[in-house]
Image: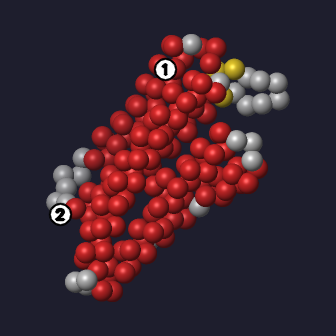
Amino acid sequence: MLLHFLLLTSVCWMFCEALNLYFSTFTTFTNGNHLRLMMGFSWGLPAFVVAMAAINNLENYKRKAGDFCWLDTEPMTYWFGTPVIIIAIVNFVLYILVIKSLAANARLNRQSSITDLKSCFAMIIVLGSTWVFGFFTMLTDVLIFQYMFAISNSLQGFCVFYCYC
């Protein structure tokens, strides 16, 4: 259950980063209270989903011999796959909106907008491309997807550093 909760938390924080990127691109003034809302969402929604999955059927969390404790295949689709897919689609839409805005501004101020576009291309790793490999990891037993998921997930911190520092 802890793995389920922490992975969903990671996906929710990825969504909050997409919202932060969107707000920083499209709004001039913010009230600064977004962090508390994002924290409540990123920790609360996964707690709710994991609690509902456990209440629905605690036997869905089974430890197979020599394997890690994770949801069975069918419940995994509902209790993990659905939130991940929804958040990935919303992140993709927000990302496209930000790229369109930055591309339109690139015509006006060439140098700073090119830097912004480079940062946004690095942000695609943070905003969900890693979970494409994660999804293939869950659906197949192909080792290359597991390596790509681990490598791309470990590069998320570097990409955030590259974009903001």
Q: Residues within 10 Å of mark 1 (few under 14, many from 20)?
A: some
> Which residue was labeled with disc 2?
28
The residue located at (64%, 27%) in the rendering is 73
Task: Name the residue that disc number 1 marks.
Answer: 51
Q: Is residue 66 left or right of residue 157?
A: right
User: Where's residue 92, x and y in %?
Assistant: 40, 54
Q: Earlier in the sequence, mark 1 or mark 2?
A: 2
At which x and y percent is residue 116?
A: 36, 74
In the rendered image, the vertical position of residue 97 relative to residue 55, given as above or below: below
Q: Quadrant of residue 119?
A: bottom left
Q: Amino acid at mark 1?
A: Ala
Please tell me the numbered disc located at residue 158: none
In the image, is 105 to the left or to the right of 71? Answer: left
Can the viewer see residue 7? Answer: yes
| Quarter of the figure with the C terminus | bottom left
* Residue 30: x %, y % from top left: 19, 55
